Image (spheres, rainbow, N blue to C red):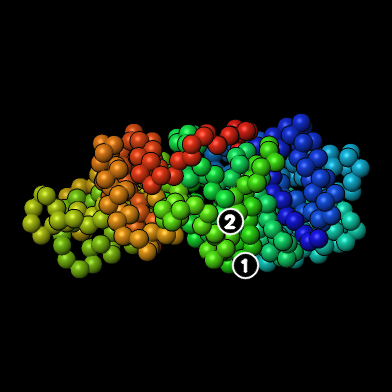
Amino acid sequence: MGIVVQKYGGSSVADAASVKRVAQRIVNTKRLGHQVVVVVSAMGDTTDDLIDLANEVSPLPPARELDMLLTAGERISMAVLAMAIQNLGHEARSFTGSQAGVITDAAHGKAKIIDVTPGRIQDALGEDAIAIVAGFQGVSQTTKDITTLGRGGSDTTAVALAVALEADVCEIYSDVDGIFTADPRIEPRARKVSRISYEETLEMAAQGAKILHLRCVEYARRYDMPIHVRSSFSEKEGTWVVKAEDVVQEDSMEAAIITGVAHDRSQAKLTVVGVPDKPGEAAALFRAVADAQINIDMIVQNVSAAATNLTDISFTLPAGEGQTAVKELSRLQETIGFESIQYDDSVGKVSIVGAGMSSSPGISARFFEALSDAGVNIEMISTSEIRVSVVVAEAQINEAVNAAHAAFDLGSDEIEAVVYGGTGR
Ligand code: ASP
Ligand code: MG
C-alpha cells in the first residue's frame, strides 16, 4: 500500500487527551499497511496566543523573529504527538519544516513553497517509522531564515508534501465532517458534499467558506492530488476534493447545478462619488489602491445621481484594509476632482457556487428571486463561470444564505452537520 499524508488541525490536537486520540488514529492507519506522514498545526489557539505575546513586547514585531516565534507552536505539537505514538509502541520521528525539506521564498509571514526535498521523510518511512512534520513553516532558499506560510498554512504543507512524496491521498482532519453545502452554524439543514471539484472548492474558499487554505487547493489542483477533508472526531467518510471529471453526480441533475452557498462577513464597500467621466480616472483610482497592496473584488461603475458627466465607482475590499484605501484615495481627490468617498463595512458577500451553472440558464434569476422573497436587498453583483455573488447588508447575511440554500434544494431532511471541537482548525 502507498503513502498517506494526514494533516491534523489545531482543534484536533488541542490538549493531551486529543493528542493521544490522534496518535491512536495514526497508528490505526499504519496498521492497515500504509506508510504514514503526519502534518500538524499548533495546539488549539497557540498561534493566536503567540501573536498576542509578540504584540505585548513590541508594537511592530520584526517579521523574521515573529516567524521564528510562531513556528514554535507547530514544534510543540509535532514533538508531543511523536511521544504519544511511541507510547503506543510505534516508531515516530518529528521534523521541522526545514528538516522536512520545505523550501520557500523569503517573504516572512506569507512565504510560498518553491521546492520540497523530503529526503529525511523518505528515510524515516524506509525505516518503518511514522514521520511527523511541523506544518505552516519552511526555510528560505536565499536567506536560510525560517519562514511561515500564512495563517492556516499547514494545509498547504500537507498537500505539498503529499505531492513531493507521490502519496495516494492527502487527508485533512478538522472538527467538522467535511465540506457542507453551507455553514452549518447558519444553515442547520446543510448537507455534506461527498465529492467536489478543485475549481468549486477554490471558489467556495475564495468566497469566504472556511474549508481549506486557498493555496492548498491551488497546489492540489496543479498536481491533481486528491484531498479527503474529514473529521478527526468521527470515523465518517468526509468530502473528496478531486478533479472535475471525477465528480460523479449522485443525485438528480438539479442537485448538481449548485454545489454550495458561501458567505463572507469580512468585506466592506467603498464608493468614490462623482468621478469625472473621462479616460484615465478609474485607472488612477485603482492604481492607488493596488500600490497599497489592497486586494479588491467586485467593481461597479454607475452614472452618478449627483450630476451629469460624473460617475460613481464602487468596489469591495477586505474591511481590514478600509482605512488605508480611504487614506490613499483621499489624496487623489483634488487632482481627479471627485466629490467624496463613502465607506461602509456593514456589508457581506453571499455566493452560490456550482460547476453545473455554466450550462443551465436561469440560475441568477432564481437566486435573486429567493433573495427578494426573503426581503434581502442586493447592493452589488458579480459572477464567474461557476459562481454568482451578491453584496448584501451584513445583518441580512444569514437570511440570504438560508434563502439561497432553500431555493436550490440543497438541504437534507435530517440534521447532518456536527461541529465537534470548536477551537482553531
Ligand atoms: N497554526 C497556524 C495557524 O493557526 C497554521 C495552521 O493552523 O495551519 O494559522
Ligand atoms: Mg490553527
In the rendered image, residue 325, in percent from the top left (x then y), is placed at: 34, 50
Residue 48, image quadrant: top right
In the rendered image, residue 257, in percent from the top left (x then y), is placed at: 42, 55
Residue 223's tag is 1
The disc labelled 1 sits on which kind of residue?
A: Tyr
Residue 291 seen by the camera: no
- Please report the residue visible at 61 percent of the width from the left and 66 percent of the height from the top: 224
Kindly report which numbered mark, 2 or 1, lies closer to the viewer in this rendering.
2
Between 422 and 325, the one nearer to me in the picture:
422
In the rendered image, residue 191, in percent from the top left (x then y), is placed at: 51, 42
Between 294 and 212, the one nearer to me in the picture:
212
Circle 2 — which element?
Answer: strand
In the rendered image, residue 412, in percent from the top left (x then y), is placed at: 48, 39
Between 339 and 303, the one nearer to me in the picture:
303
Circle 1 — which element?
Answer: helix
- Please report the residue visible at 72 percent of the width from the left and 61 percent of the height from the top: 168
Contact? badges 2 and 1 (CB < 8 Å): no
Residues at marks 2 and 1, CA–CA distance in whole angstroms: 13 Å
The disc labelled 2 sits on which kind of residue?
A: Val
Q: Quadrant of the C terminus?
A: top right
Residue 396 seen by the camera: yes
Residue 293's tag is none
Q: Is residue 357 left or right of residue 106?
A: left
Residue 241's tag is 2
Q: Sort mark 2 into few (<14), some (14-19) or many (20+) by Cα contacts within 10 Å.
A: many
